[in-house]
Amino acid sequence: MPALSKNPLILGIETSCDDCSVSLVQGYQKVHVLLLDSQHRVHRDYRGIVPELASRNHSKAIFHMFKDLQKKALDCGIDLGRDLDAIAVTNRPGLSGSLLVGTQFAKGLALGYNIPVIPVDHILAHFFSYRIEHDEAYPAIACVVSGGHTLFGIAHDPLRIEIVGRTLDDACGEAFDKLATFYNMGYPGGPVIDRLAQNGSPKAARFSKMPIPKNSYDISFSGLKTAATVHRSRHWNSEFEFSHEHLCASFSHVAIGMIIDRIRLLLQKEHKKGIKTIVFGGGVAVNTNLRKEMEILAREYSVSVLFPSLQYCVDNAAMIACLGCYMYQSQSQKNWNLDFGVQARVPAYRSQKGRK
Ligand code: KG4
Ligand code: ZN
């Protein structure tokens, strides 16, 4: 077997849902190229993602995106045929048709270049996305908040995350998207609601938080979503006139507040055990209020909070390449098995239920 490169050049491919992305990353932090083709305009009219359209658009986009990446790499003096060490591709979880496009494209390229193809779990990549801009920080409290997932965990290393809480229904970003759809505010809803919330009062509506359960850090957004879409008169404070700004501010206050409450409790438990870092990933991690509140919490407990910047929070292939780099260097599997699946199957997902 040839010697492993210390600073491998990895091509990342991400097609698990509606974003098609390719990226060329050297080591963990040198992102030479990152290309993203979002399908928001395709799915906007349907107010949600249509799986068949997503896979069809991935098949149309991926080849052109790869050709574009190849050109940009040449501009940086990189010849993929000569310099590429491995290809990392999302193989789960996600929409099966979409995953199929990325994994088969990766297999074909790997055959052509005669290099390994590394199957990467999308959620673990979100958990590791902070690493593109920060040094490794383990153990850490880790939180992924995206359009498809909401998970709280203790990260022991990039592939070993003890999940202690998850959403019981909607993902956090999904709740933002559904509220925005209901009130015709646009799609995806998170960025719009975030912007409008800055000019509204968080006290305009009395939405309730789901309390933290006794035995886990689980969370639920469906009650909040229902309260924000129906019975407006029941939840509205009489001194405020209804406006989208007030609605968004009140909704965000409670949605983000529930996340902060869980991180605070985790900190209270884990800080004593020496955990001094919190890492975030996923599209909702760009939320203005979440970042502000986390800064306050971090100061209160003298811990550091590591957020990826916007392009690495949302679905992107750089985080896939970055985790691929770790898996390549640590040779985490002897034979890469490139099956794909809609469910996460890595051992890290076996929840250690219970708050000790
Ligand atoms: O990580 P991501 O690109 O996709 C998934 O893996 O699901 O996250 C997309 C989600 C969408 O639901 C979007 O509404 C939400 O992230 N989002 C936000 C913000 N920006 C994007 N949610 C709240 N505040 C934001 N500023
Ligand atoms: Zn994602």
Image (cartoon, grey):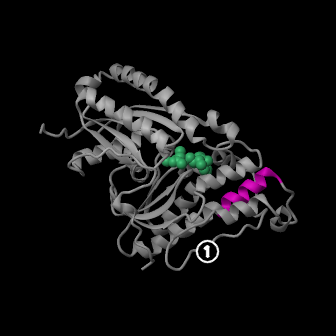
Give the percent coordinates (x, y) of residue 142: 43, 60
The residue shown at (67%, 38%) is 44
The N terminus sits in image quarter: top left
Identify whether 296 is placed above or below 321. Answer: below
Q: Dot 1: few (<14), some (14–19), or many (≥20) neighbours within 10 Å?
A: few
The residue shown at (57%, 57%) is 171
Residue at which label 1 appears: 211
Identify whether 169 is placed above or below 216. Answer: above
Residue 245 sits inside the magenta stretch: yes
In the image: residue 302, left or right of residue 49:
left
Nearer the observer, 163 or 337:
337
The residue shown at (39%, 51%) is 128
Give the percent coordinates (x, y) of residue 140: 38, 62
Does residue 37 appear anywhere in the picture?
no
In the image: residue 54, left or right of residue 86:
right
**Please, what is the dominant secondary structure of the magenta stretch?**
helix
Residue 3 sits inside the magenta stretch: no
Nearer the observer, 145 or 131:
145
Q: Quadrant of residue 137?
A: bottom left
Magenta region, residue range: 243-254
Q: Quadrant of residue 250?
A: bottom right
In the image: residue 167, left or right of residue 223:
left
Give the percent coordinates (x, y) of residue 61: 49, 27
